Image: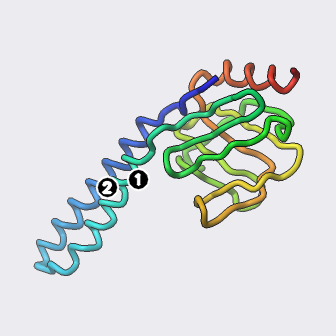
Amino acid sequence: MRYNLAGRENLEALFTGGGLAAGAVGLGIALAKRALGAVALPLAVGSGLVWLGRNLGESFVEIGGDTLRVKMGSLFDETIPLNDVARVKETQWNILGGLGVRTNLQNWVAVVSKTGPVADISFWRPIRLPVIRHIYHIRAQRLIVSPEHLDSFIADLQGRLRG
């Protein structure tokens, strides 16, 4: 069963809007100072944020026959065997933790697109999960995700773990 990530549209709008704002403000400051060479940096930052917002693409958590797949556009796409999952429970995610792919650099990775109640998935053993895809990974004991219909997701995953 596929559960879209809750709040993905807000995260996409935040990146895209932030990118447009960064580019416009930087361009305005550079033009006011008549420093046309300085135009490149804000335009690059703005364009990067717009690109990131547009590339969140499909964002979901999917429980398959014997796997759990978590995808957040081009940022995160991992498939985990269900026999590696020990348990799942509800927890709270605070805005101070940030949105997107996050980590504490020790034992958890979060793929979150909203604050509030989220699912906290624990593993039997640490699993190699990306923080920056193809560049930086950690050995995570937990994965935190923010699916829509959280109660249904938790019940579905718990049912698969018992079965």
Q: Residue at x 30, y 60 (%)?
A: 47
Quadrant where the C terminus sits is top right
Q: Which residue is mark 1?
A: 52
Amino acid type for the residue under numbered disc 1: Leu
Question: Residue 71: x and y, percent?
Answer: 58, 42
Label 1 SS? helix
Do the numbered discs 1 and 2 sit on residues whose CB atoms are within 8 Å?
Answer: yes
Disc 2 is placed on an element classified as helix
What residue is shown with label 2? 19
The amino acid type, in three-letter code, at marker 2 is Gly
Q: Residues within 10 Å of mark 2 (few under 14, many from 20)?
A: many
Lower position in the chain sequence, tag 1 or tag 2: 2
Please tell me which residue lies in front, 43 or 56.
Answer: 56
In this picture, residue 140 sits left or right of residue 110: right
Figure label count: 2
65 to 135, vertically: above or below: above
Q: Is residue 44 above or below residue 16?
A: below
Residue 140 % position (x, y): 77, 53
30 relative position to 74: left or right? left
The answer to whether residue 52 is above or below residue 160 is below
Left or right of 132: which side holds 106? right
Residue 27, percent from left and from top: 18, 66
Which quadrant is home to the N terminus? top right
Res. 79 image quadrant: top right
Residue plotted at (41% across, 53% down):
52
How far apart marks 1 and 2 lie (CA) works out to: 9 Å
- Who is closer to the viewer here, 57 or 13? 57
The spot of residue 105 in percent (x, y) is: 71, 61
Identify the disc placed on residue 41: none
The correct choice, above or below, for 81 with respect to 163 in the image is below
